[in-house]
Image (cartoon, coloured by chain):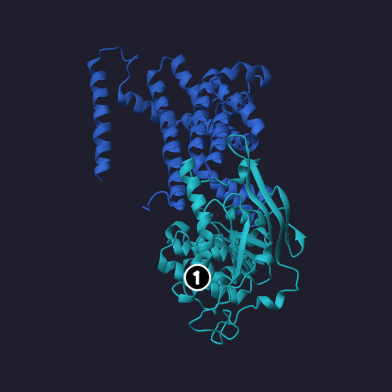
Amino acid sequence: MTAANAQPLPSDHRSPRPNGRWKSGSNTLVLPDRHAHENVTPKVSLEGISLSYKASDGSRFLALDHIDLNVQPGEFLCIVGPSGCGKSTLLHLIAGLHHQSAGTVLVDGHTVDGPGTDRILIFQELGLFPWLKVGENVEFGMKMKNVPKAERQERVEHYLRLVHLAQFKNSYTHQLSGGMRQRVALARALATEPDVLLMDEPFAALDAQTRDLLHDELERIWAETGRTIIFVTHNVREAIRLGDRVVLLTFRPGRLKREFPVELPRPRHLEDVDVARAAREILDELRGEINRSLEAEYRDGVKPRVDPEAQQ
Amino acid sequence: MKRILRYVIFYGALLGIWAILAKLKLWPPYLFPTPWGVGESLYAGFSDHSYWIAIMVSMQRVLIGYAVSVMLGMILGLGVSSSKFLEETMGGLLVSLQSLPSICWWPLALLWFGLSQNAILFVVIMGSLLSVTMAMEDGRKQMPKIFGMAGRNLGARGFRLFWHVLLPASLPFIVSGLKQGWAFAWRSLITAEMLYMSLGLGQVLMMGRDLSDMNQVIAVMLLIIALGYIVDGLIFKTIERRLQHKWGLVPAT
């Protein structure tokens, strides 16, 4: 379903590029080339993932429906969809925090059946530990992995420097601003040195300036560390700003609707005309889904709840 | 400064009224003692070490009993909060057991352990175990789920998940329950000591009654209040404030 729907975005008619597609120019960052990996085992592979659970009225509710998706090593994949389409849930499944009703999640060809430090999820609400200092938060995952203390300290320093928070090592998280907390969560995830970084609408609650800054930082860190990133957002422009590829999920049940390779040169900016145009095309596809989501919201009077906890 | 002044005025007035009432001799002195009589009794009790010994013995008992009930209560509370079956069955049992005054365990404790230290400890544990258990259960439920998920996500599981994540995450929610457990333990201890002659503050209090020494009765009552206040009002308050500060629930002072 994925390959068949893959369509390149149309060319920019005003400034046509060599082969009619948006291609990286010579002035771009040196980034991992996803095309180099196309014959390699996918980093993350979803095979026929479905998730259903019992709703409060006793009926079965299908949240995710037969999702097939491959993510290449070093790829930056963005998942967009209306609220309630199950895109966060999908990340939780990859993280191994919940179990799908059907299908398999593979990482490096191995079946996932629980959390593992090769995949770290950055939660929408972050989940930083308020009883630990910033440095101890970053250290936490390494401590659980039994990394020796000296190395832990070194890596804490390194990753805090990477997110420009070295001088806040001994602060508590509530003393930091939203953007800084976001960076702590990023450092905490990176410090365990996962192969795959799962990010669940991490920048949704931030102001525009902070978000722009964090986009730049995330892109830089991605380029420096070569991690695979799966990034969930409802903001289409953000998805195009960051992703190598954007996949679109439908609303209730969540299905893969379409995928869009993004071949605009990096670094991109949210305000770029090309980004806006690409976003417009995806938004046109998305609009129907958003409308259905809003209708459901008004009809039911509540936000659609996709809560895999409820299935137990 | 102003606060201290308020305290001085309030307690000064209280002592003054007491002194005047005693001076008026409305009641015979063996029923209504004077403040200085009580003061003398306190002085005498501390200088012949009998109050010190009583305090040490009582504190030791309550600390042991409380520590045991905190440990047992945490395990029980964790069990009840993590299993639907236990929650529905044992949860109800715990609530109903809590309506039983802890001293009702005394006859049972006597038959099981005889007239001994263990009988007293048993009553203390039964007095505070339930509130610790319920506090723990409640704390686990109130604790935001995200912490447990974040902990598992970062590779914590089993005991380490409990020790490094679930326990610290639920502390702000269980600390008031722990405080209540302490208050129950302290009350149960004094009650049990009054029924059983074995040093301890409760026994000194009863001795005052047996000797018709009203000064001693009031002096020991004051001691019990003071000790309760020190632990409850100072130690637990400090822990609570620290936790809240650490969590950013109150502005730093």
Judging by the rendered image, the residue that carries numbered circle 1 is A215
The answer to whether A298 is drawn above or below residue B207 in the figure is: below
> How far across and down, in percent of the image, does residue A100 sit?
69, 49
In this view of the protein, can residue A159 be seen by the observer?
yes
The answer to whether A12 is drawn above or below residue A181 in the figure is: below
**Chain A drawn in what color?**
cyan
The residue drawn where x is 54% and y is 70% is: A242
Q: Residues within 10 Å of mark 1 (few under 14, many from 20)?
A: many
Q: Nearer the viewer, residue B81 or B4?
A: B81
- Is label 1 in a helix, a strand or a loop? helix
Chain letter tied to blue: B
Q: Nearer the viewer, residue A78 or A149?
A: A78
Q: Nearer the viewer, residue B85 or A241?
A: A241
Query: Which quadrant would residue B65 be assigned to in this image?
Result: top right
Query: Which quadrant would residue A250 be assigned to in this image?
Result: bottom right
Looking at the image, residue B4 sits to the left or right of residue B127; the answer is left
The answer to whether B247 is drawn above or below residue A21 in the figure is: above
> How far across and down, in percent of the image, does residue A49 sit?
69, 54
Looking at the image, residue B164 sits to the left or right of residue A38; the answer is left
